[in-house]
Image (tube, rainbow, N blue to C red):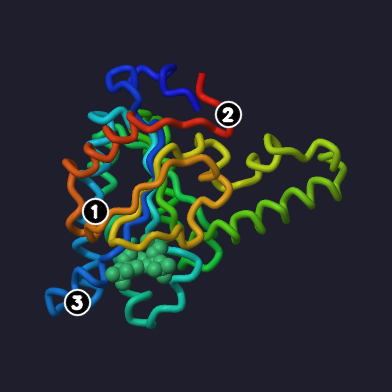
């Protein structure tokens, strides 16, 4: 994906157009302070605004953040309920600022398992920000890369069964049109905080050629300065996409 065509990225040469972040380490951050895990999730949620607002400064047009995975339901009922309540409160509280900052919000993931009130808040936030274009924030909530591909395949198969799609037409261009991320460019840079070097089912198809940064900082300590440094170091990477450098 070329960054040169966008007006924002022209300001920062070699900027990652789309950054995706696995916001990890909230639990350990809280434990280090002798506090319950939810205390860490609240601290983590507070970091999001600064990072979203920093995007235009670093030439980032798309920011995608992993908030809750399809595997996170395995956690205790207390933690899951606390997270769901945090998501509801976060959306209600941040809507005004996101709108004012020109942020367009989208959600990816399967909404079916989420409660009705949260789904309503998510839909409203998407609708209220749909004319914004300064930053494209995508929140992955009940998202799993494998689940996304399975749901996409189901819809694709339905289109084949109903005669809308010829199986011979299925290729690398067609399939991603069925993914939750269909309107987003592929991520250029994937950052994971907290020292874990794994992708935990995040953007499996989309990250095929992303650059990765695994950093030790726990998510509640992640700062605009560190984000800027990672975006700057992305500019020095040699992305070959399987080819040979001229
Ligand atoms: C990331 O922090 C947030 C979610 C997965 C919801 P964790 O809760 O995974 O924090 P650690 O990894 O236990 O420190
Ligand atoms: C990935 O973190 C999911 C989110 C950040 C929302 P996890 O903490 O759930 O991942 P694992 O269990 O360490 O792989
Ligand atoms: Mg974790």
Dot in front, 3 or 2: 2
Q: Quadrant of residue 40?
A: bottom left
Q: Is mark 3 within 8 Å of ligand 1?
A: yes
* Whole-percent x, y for residue 186 in the image: 51, 38
Dot 2 lies on which element?
loop
* Whole-percent x, y for residue 50 in the image: 20, 44
Dot in front, 2 or 1: 2
Q: Are marks 3 and 2 in contact (CB under 8 Å)?
A: no
Dot 1 lies on which element?
helix
* Whole-percent x, y for residue 73 in the image: 46, 74
Left or right: residue 117 versus residue 36 is right
Separation (CA) of disc 3 from disc 2: 46 Å
Q: Which mark is residue 20?
A: none
Separation (CA) of disc 2 from disc 1: 47 Å
Dot 3 lies on which element?
helix
Q: Residue 31 carries which label?
A: 3
- Residue located beneath label 2 in the image: 243
Q: In which quarter of the image is residue 24?
A: bottom left
Separation (CA) of disc 3 from disc 1: 26 Å
- Residue located beneath label 1 in the image: 93
């Amino acid at each position: 994906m070329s960054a040169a065509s966008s007006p924002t990225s022209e300001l920062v040469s070699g900027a990652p157009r789309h950054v995706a972040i696995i916001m990890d380490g909230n639990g350990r951050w809280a434990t280090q302070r002798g506090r319950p895990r939810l205390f860490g999730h609240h601290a983590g949620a507070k970091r999001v605004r600064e990072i979203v607002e920093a995007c235009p400064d670093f030439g980032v047009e798309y920011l995608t953040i992993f908030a809750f995975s399809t595997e996170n339901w395995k956690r205790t009922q207390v933690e899951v309920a606390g997270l769901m309540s945090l998501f509801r409160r976060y959306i209600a509280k941040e809507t005004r600022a996101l709108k004012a900052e020109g942020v367009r919000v989208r959600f990816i993931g399967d909404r079916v398992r989420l409660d009705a009130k949260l789904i309503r808040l998510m839909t409203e936030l998407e609708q209220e920000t749909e004319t914004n274009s300064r930053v494209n924030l995508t929140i992955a909530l009940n998202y799993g890369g494998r689940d996304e591909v399975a749901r996409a395949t189901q819809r694709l198969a339905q289109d084949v069964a109903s005669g809308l799609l010829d199986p011979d037409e299925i290729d690398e261009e067609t399939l991603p049109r069925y993914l939750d991320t269909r309107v987003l460019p592929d991520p250029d840079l994937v950052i994971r905080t907290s020292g874990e070097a794994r992708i935990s089912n995040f953007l499996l198809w989309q990250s095929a050629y992303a650059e990765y940064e695994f950093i030790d900082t726990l998510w509640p300590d992640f700062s605009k300065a560190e984000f800027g440094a990672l975006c700057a170091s992305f500019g020095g990477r040699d992305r070959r996409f399987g080819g040979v450098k001229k």
